[in-house]
Amino acid sequence: MLELSQKIIDEMTKGFFSSEIEVCNIEHVGDTEVLLLGFERYYLRAGSSAAVIIQCICTGDTQMAVVSGLGGETGLLHESWGANEDIAYKVLGILRTYGFAQEKEESMKCGRKNYP
């Protein structure tokens, strides 16, 4: 899980559209590993910050991730310019490159088997 977390951190913090890491925690509960990552990024077009929370759970040879994009809203009506979706889809793209597959289009859950 440490290797996966470092790969996600490397991808999210590089380049012009990088995000700041806010949370990085790995816990062990019996045979299960739980990774919690949180990133935040300021979006100029929305005039606010968007964040993404990534939770990866590894049990045996099965790994699952849940990705949640947050924030990115502005004004009294809390208009969203899609910044929260942008940052969440960036993470989904990173997870796909490491063997994860999205379960449902409207869901931010994805998983993979045979974790090395």
Image (tube, helix red, strand yellow):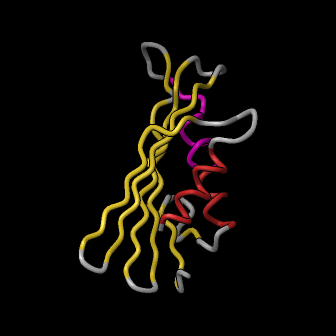
50 shown above or below 67? above
21 or 100, which lies in front?
A: 21
User: In this image, 67 relative to 89: left or right?
Assistant: left
Can you tell which quarter of the image residue 92 is in? bottom right
Q: Point out the image quarter for the C terminus.
A: bottom right
64 shown above or below 73? below
11 or 112, which lies in front?
A: 11
Secondary structure mostly seen in the magenta stretch: helix
85 or 53, which lies in front?
A: 53
Can you tell which quarter of the image residue 45 is in? top right
Q: Residue at x 65, y 20 (%)?
A: 44
Q: Residue at x 59, y 35 (%)?
A: 82
Residue 12: x and y in percent read 63, 45
Residue 47: x and y in percent read 58, 17
Residue 85 falls inside the magenta stretch: yes
Residue 64 falls inside the magenta stretch: no
Can you tell which quarter of the image residue 31 is in? bottom left
> Which residue of the protein is positioned furthest toward the top in this rendering?
76
Q: Residue at x 42, y 13 (%)?
A: 76
Residue numbers of the magenta segment: 79-90
Residue 38: x and y in percent read 45, 44
